[in-house]
């Protein structure tokens, strides 16, 4: 059902919009999980159709509802959705609220509706057949896990974008196996440090316990933060190798763009402050900020990329401020503003 009216207060999840659930045919409604597949889009008219068609084609033992959060798009996304996807629920926000806050609108709506799972899929991702069913089977088999991801490939290539997320010695989140040829990767199903929000399944039970995305993140690292908060509450993140999806890498923010560089740098420092051990965080935060200013800024200037140099400087300043602001919240189970 297409609902084009902007939702006042939707960025906080205040408004709940009626919907039509798409039930799996031939399955008893009380015997299959309810899944809300959530797609956040900002100016994604050029690629969201492929994303939604792939979701609509999923065959899974689930009551699947597809929800698009239109994040203030002005590129014809709204008209496209109304014209081509009448069975998709659309929540329209008047402004670009960022990845986490926009997802929170639909996540709170899913929780209020009693959903069992939320499937998060970027608008530039196309899930392959069996993706959802494979992750649901992993969730059934591994009750100790609350967040699930599969193999994310670069669109049009047989190279890995992510097999889950790892955190290095400097507290930086890294996509596991990034750039490696698919044929060279042999990963068994099993625990992983964090899931990538590009294509993930989340048990709603987890969100009711630890909250939704921390709204202090605009984009990048909010999936890592959510994964680490889940781990602190005893939930594992799980990798299911055969759940495959394909990604138009950084289509929204632009791969290597100044915006991406700034958001990654800021998110990194905030996440270090929140999740590293106190002494380690106390060492990493100033070292990382100084490294950006003293090494990365001059390096980008030398390479003739002043926009990236400025992004590194902004990341050091804004990231340090975000880290200091985060310190009092280290002990909070649910971040302020992330209440389910």
Image (spheres, grey):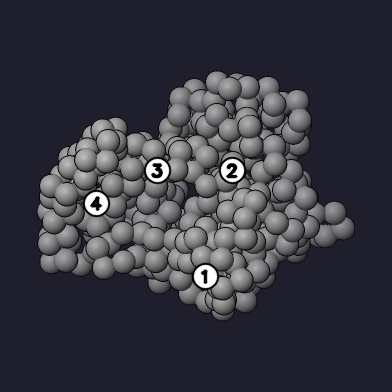
Picture coordinates of residue 273, whole percent (x, y): 22, 56
Q: Nearer the viewer, residue 197 or 138?
A: 197
- Tag 2's secondary structure? loop
Q: How far apart are the alpha carbons under marks 1 and 2?
A: 23 Å
Picture coordinates of residue 2, whole percent (x, y): 70, 29
- Marks 3/4 in contact by CB < 8 Å: the verdict is no
* Residue under the image location 40 percent in, 72 percent down: 234
Residue position for label 3: 256
Picture coordinates of residue 256, whole percent (x, y): 40, 43
- Marks 4/1 in contact by CB < 8 Å: the verdict is no
Camera-near label (4 vs 1) is: 4
Q: Quarter of the image containing the N terminus?
A: top right
Residue position for label 2: 124
Q: Decide if residue 9 is in sight here.
A: yes
Residue position for label 4: 269
Q: Quadrant of residue 48?
A: top right
The correct choice, above or below, for 17 with respect to 282 in the image is above
Camera-near label (1 vs 2) is: 2
- Tag 1's secondary structure? strand
Q: Nearer the viewer, residue 60 or 51?
A: 51
Residue position for label 1: 238
Q: Earlier in the sequence, mark 1 or mark 2?
A: 2
Say which mark, if any, is on residue 104: none
Q: Decide if residue 7 is in sight here.
A: no
- Tag 4's secondary structure? helix
Q: Earlier in the sequence, mark 2 or mark 4?
A: 2
Q: How far apart are the alpha carbons under marks 3 and 4?
A: 19 Å
Q: How far apart are the alpha carbons under marks 2 and 4?
A: 27 Å
């Amino acid at each position: 059902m297409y609902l084009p009216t902007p939702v006042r207060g939707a960025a906080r999840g205040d408004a709940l919009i009626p919907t039509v659930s798409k039930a799996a045919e031939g399955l008893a409604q009380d015997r299959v999980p309810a899944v809300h597949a959530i797609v956040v889009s900002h100016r994604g008219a050029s690629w969201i159709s492929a994303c939604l068609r792939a979701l609509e084609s999923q065959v899974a033992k689930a009551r699947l509802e597809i929800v698009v959060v239109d994040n203030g798009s002005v590129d014809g996304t709204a008209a496209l959705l109304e014209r081509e996807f009448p069975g998709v629920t659309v929540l329209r926000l008047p402004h670009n609220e960022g990845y986490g806050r926009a997802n929170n609108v639909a996540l709170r709506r899913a929780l209020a509706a009693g959903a069992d799972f939320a499937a998060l899929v970027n608008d530039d991702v196309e899930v392959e057949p069996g993706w959802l069913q494979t992750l649901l089977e992993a969730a059934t088999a591994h009750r100790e896990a609350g967040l699930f991801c599969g193999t994310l490939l670069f669109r049009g290539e047989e190279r890995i974008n992510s097999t889950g997320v790892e955190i290095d010695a400097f507290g930086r989140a890294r996509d596991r196996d990034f750039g490696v040829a698919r044929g060279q990767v042999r990963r068994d199903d099993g625990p992983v440090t964090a899931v990538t929000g590009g294509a993930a399944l989340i048990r709603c039970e987890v969100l009711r316990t630890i909250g939704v995305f921390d709204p202090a993140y605009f984009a990048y690292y909010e999936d890592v933060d959510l994964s680490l908060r889940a781990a602190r509450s005893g939930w594992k993140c799980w990798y299911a190798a055969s759940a495959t999806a394909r990604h138009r890498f950084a289509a929204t923010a632009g791969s290597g763009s100044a915006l991406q560089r700034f958001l990654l740098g800021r998110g990194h420092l905030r996440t270090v402050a929140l999740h590293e051990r106190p002494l380690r965080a106390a060492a990493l935060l100033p070292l990382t900020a100084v490294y950006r200013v003293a090494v990365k800024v001059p390096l980008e200037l030398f390479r003739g990329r002043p926009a990236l140099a400025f992004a590194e400087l902004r990341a050091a300043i804004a990231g340090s401020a975000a880290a200091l602001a985060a310190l009092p919240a280290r002990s909070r189970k649910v971040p302020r503003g992330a209440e389910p």
